[in-house]
Image: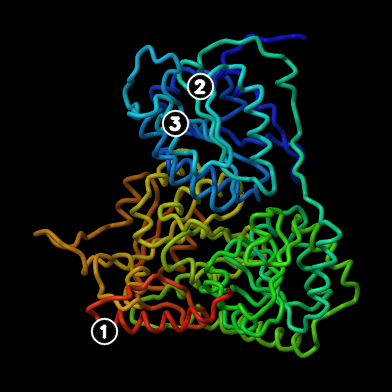
Amino acid sequence: MTTIRLTMAQALVRYLTAQRVTTGNGTEPLFGGMWAIFGHGNVSGLGGALYAVRETFPTFRAHNEQGMALAAAAYAKAHFRRRIMAVTTSIGPGCTNLVTAAATAHVNRLPMLLLPSDVFISRAPDPVLQQVEDFQDGTVSAVDCLRPVSRYFDRIVAPSQLLTALPRAIAVLTDAAQCGPVTLALPQDVQSMAYDWPEEFFAERVVHFRQPPADPGEVAAVAAVLRNAKRPLVVNGGGVLYSKGGCAALRAFVEKHGIPVGESQAGKGALPWDHPMLSGAIGVTGSTAANALAEEADVVIAVGTRLQDFTTGSHALYAQAKLVSINAAPFDAIKWSATEMVADAAVGLAALSAALGTWQSETAWREKSVKLNDQWRRMVKEIVVSPRADLPTYAEVIGAVQASSPDSETQDIAVCAAGTLPAELHKLWRTSTPGGYHMEYGYSCMGYEVAGGVGVKMAHPDREVIVIVGDGSYLMLNNELATSVMLGLKIIVVVTDNAGYACITRLQKACGGAPFNNMYVDCLQGPHGIPAIDFALNARSLGANAETVTSVTELREAMVRARASDKSTLISITIDGPQCTEEGGAWWEVGIPEVSERAEVRAARAQLEQDKKKQRL
């Protein structure tokens, strides 16, 4: 056996560079590179190994470990999980800064390889700078915080352990059901240890993404449920987008069998927004068409969705319907006593369609669906251009962004994650391209947006990436705007400024509470009062172009200038925070106190108890 002597860090980097994947562009590296903020623990071992391959395996520097890991998650999502980024940090706060981003990827089933440095295995200099000491367990370090938010976790205490750990990591990262973050803790002394590696370990390998087939018995069971249905409805999730051929399979299925589709946040874009059978967004942030059909459906076919409460109206929106589920993950397929088919979305839909033969939903249901869907599309066109308040609204901002380019429905990628905008964008953003709607709404991580925009631009450098973000989320984590400038990854950031957390204020009031600690005017203040935040000035200080606009017309004109620029641009606009799109929507369960001095809270609690009676048991 031929061997090659390398340090553990050098071997790790060489193995990652040997992993390939087949894409529409041919064979490409599975890993797009490494996000890295160096500190003690990784600057010498892994840092030196990365320097040696910097021309072929790029290393990207960011400004915050959470931000770069969120960019990695967005990169994987934008590639429909077919390409991945790795992330390395130092041993202390650099490592723990990864936890939120890892949780975001975990919830959203997104792959990324986390390579945090760890304390010395030898313990010779113990405790080292930044080391977290556990008084009961000498094997615990800060890296163990990542265990609950990793799909696979390993600590490499000897170089030879990479021979088993790395193939396992790749297997999890590329598995349809297990996909999520993988953490390999890298003790800083082990990174620099040498070992004689089998040369064949570094042979180029093309990763194969399996598409789990459907079990014939499960296909028959699901088909039996559907044959007795008259008013079926498909709810599509992110699994449709992540499945090779999933979008085409969904389209063929619903056209052949005459079934309307309600799209989840993760599944939006699988069908063009103007497809006759697309009813638009479903659930708490849903359209009038999809939610009306959901209330009448006798069977709901959940395809590639984990049935989050926003998608199901806290399991009350279509509780009357029988539930069938097609999902690559058994964990998701069996939820809520569904008749399950554990299978890839494309494979499962094709098998089910073959089993159904010429069966279709009833004629009246198809006709009603097409009518309601058309009404909703016409409603959207009206909503995004109709002033509803003295200040611009979220809807008008969305309309102006899309009106600034004739190609917006096919070329733009909208990026968002938290606040009011996910609801508005879910209803109103029009896209005809899978991936044109990039919403992180599994974890709804405030601060994802700018970093996520950078990751999306890395995946799609030739498309316009537009981050639409509220002032609250922008202030959470905006420094990766500087990263976008440094790397030449041009994004457009539209900040909707409503002077606080308007989304949570609305929820607070809906639960009977008094406005408190969300909007600046309702917060405890010192002698200088509310800060006057200049978002454009902030963006310019980070190296980006920026301007502040005061009207929808000015926003549209600023968008034209931003599109023409080759540099990241921020546009800030003050909006009417309370004014949201009232059309559509569904009930959402939130915990409301059983005991309160406020009559409004007691009334909200009484309504909650009534609404809960509608939930699926």
* Crowd tier of the residue under label 1, counting other residues whose Cα lies within 10 Å: few below 14, some 14–19, many 20 or above: few
Q: Which amino acid does label 1 sit on?
A: Ala
Element at label 2: helix
Task: Where is residue 382? Give x, y as percent.
Answer: 53, 83
Mark 1 and mark 3: Cα distance apart in space:
51 Å
* Foreground disc of the pair 1, 3: 1
Q: Which amino acid does label 2 sit on?
A: Leu
Q: Which amino acid does label 3 sit on?
A: Thr
Rendered image: mark on residue 46: 2
Rendered image: mark on residue 329: none
Element at label 3: strand
* Foreground disc of the pair 1, 2: 1
- State the residue position of label 3: 89
Element at label 1: helix
Mark 3 and mark 2: Cα distance apart in space:
10 Å
Q: Which of marks 1 and 3 is nearer the N terminus?
A: 3
Residue 108 in view: yes
Mark 1–mark 2 CB contact (< 8 Å): no
Task: Where is residue 347? Give x, y as percent.
Answer: 81, 57
Apparent side of residue 20 relative to residue 401 in the rendered image (left or right): right
Residue found 40% across the figure and 40% down from its top? 97
Which colour assignment does the render follow?
rainbow
Nearest to the observer: residue 136 or residue 496: 136
Q: Quadrant of residue 368?
A: bottom right
Q: In which quarter of the image is residue 337?
A: bottom right
- State the residue position of label 1: 599
Residue found 64% across the figure and 40% down from its top? 173
Mark 1 and mark 2: Cα distance apart in space:
60 Å
Task: Where is residue 442? Give x, y as percent.
Answer: 52, 58
Residue 461 in view: no
